[in-house]
Amino acid sequence: MPQENVVSKSSKEELESSDSEECLLDMLGLTSLESLVVEESKHAEEPGNIPSLSEKNIKDLVQSHQLGLLYESEAICIFPQDFSISSEHMRRLTDELVWGGDRVQADRTYETIKVWKNGVIEHRRTLTRLENFVDGHEGWSDLCHNYLRKILSAVLGTEMVLYKEKLNLKPPGGSGFAPHLDSPSLRVALGPDGPQSFCTVMVAIDDMTIQNGCLRVSKGPWTESNHCEVVQPEQNGNPDAGGRAGAISTKAAEEMDFKDITCRGGTVVAFNGWAPHRSAANTSPFPRRAVFLTYNSKCEGDFHKQYYEKMEEMRRAWRESVGLAERQQRMEDEKLELEALKTIPNI
């Protein structure tokens, strides 16, 4: 289960805080916004960002590498280099989301992390995750609804559609994810009326290493009828933390052999909803960014919009139950009052 703070919509008071620009620059490895513009223009005309593979090429490669059999026997497959996406392209898409502000619709999550700076440990509220952004961004939409959907469908032998997405930024000092399964939590929002089988595609944005908290998976023929023990979530808990289904018990996790998935930026990995996985904290001085895209079979229906509507409803109900909604409204009222005071001439 991810150990994280409250999930909330993008809010101006958080993005305009004094630390926001500095910590985002730290995550991107940049010294200024101007350096981002230079980097963007450098790669604007770069060809070959996404492999140009015909459906026949895709099917032939999937068959030659026996990716379907690998996925069935291990619940995970790492796509060979032929399928990899340009790491520069992935970083560019990520930068456009992080720096897009109000121009790019996305649900944002912040986490308070410890940062070592000038010999002092600082606590900094940092953007660590974005969700619900694919349909509002042309580049991400093309990547997720077109290329990645096609290669995953070829491996699974059935047409797939996007169910949800999350972009994990994991800055230096960012926390990891405790052992968990995806399927139990993915079913919570829509219950029996929604899809029941899921596959997640991960695309590494930065190189994944042990030091920066790479994905770790326990490989095996995991299915709904053959999955590890999970613990029951907290009643009326945070749907993104203690109230989320799918947490693996400590005893079960200790008996598993989790393999480190180290890979280069742009590598594509797929694992099913019953594959136990986890990650450690990022102890490196650089970010470890990766996008996780969950798909379901098209024959079960397209529920992308309904999923996020229901999740927002659940999150809002949880915030209200613990008094966070009232506090957030009070902060917004105080901000508006300060803005109004700025219009009063100094005497």
Image: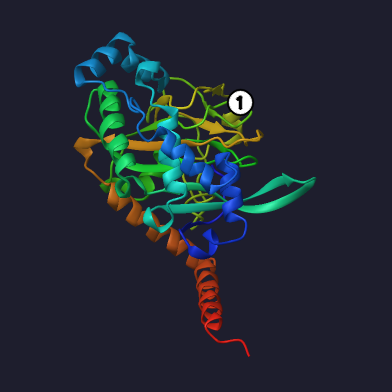
* Residue depicted at x 30% and y 47%: 135
Using the image as rendered, state which of residue 49 and residue 61 is in the foreground: 49
Badge 1 is on which residue? 210
Q: Is residue 6 above or below residue 80?
A: below
Side (left or right) of 57 relative to 81? left
Foreground: 34 or 311? 34
The quadrant of the rendering that contains the C terminus is bottom right
The residue depicted at 61 percent of the width and 42 percent of the height is 174
Q: Which picture quadrant has residue 74?
A: top left
x and y, in percent, of residue 342 in the image: 55, 80
Instruction: Please state the total of marks drawn on the protein image.
Output: 1
Which class describes the residues within 10 Å of circle 1: few (<14), some (14-19), or many (20+)? some
Kind of residue indicated by mark 1: Ile
Residue at 42%, 53% in the rendered image: 107
Which corner quadrant holds the N terminus? top right
Q: Say whether residue 20 is left or right of residue 295.
A: right
Q: Position of residue 197 (x, y in %)?
A: 31, 35
Q: Residue at x 21, y 30 (%)?
A: 159
Front-most of residues 248 and 141: 141
Q: Secondary structure at mark 1?
A: loop
Left or right: where 306 falls relative to 223: left
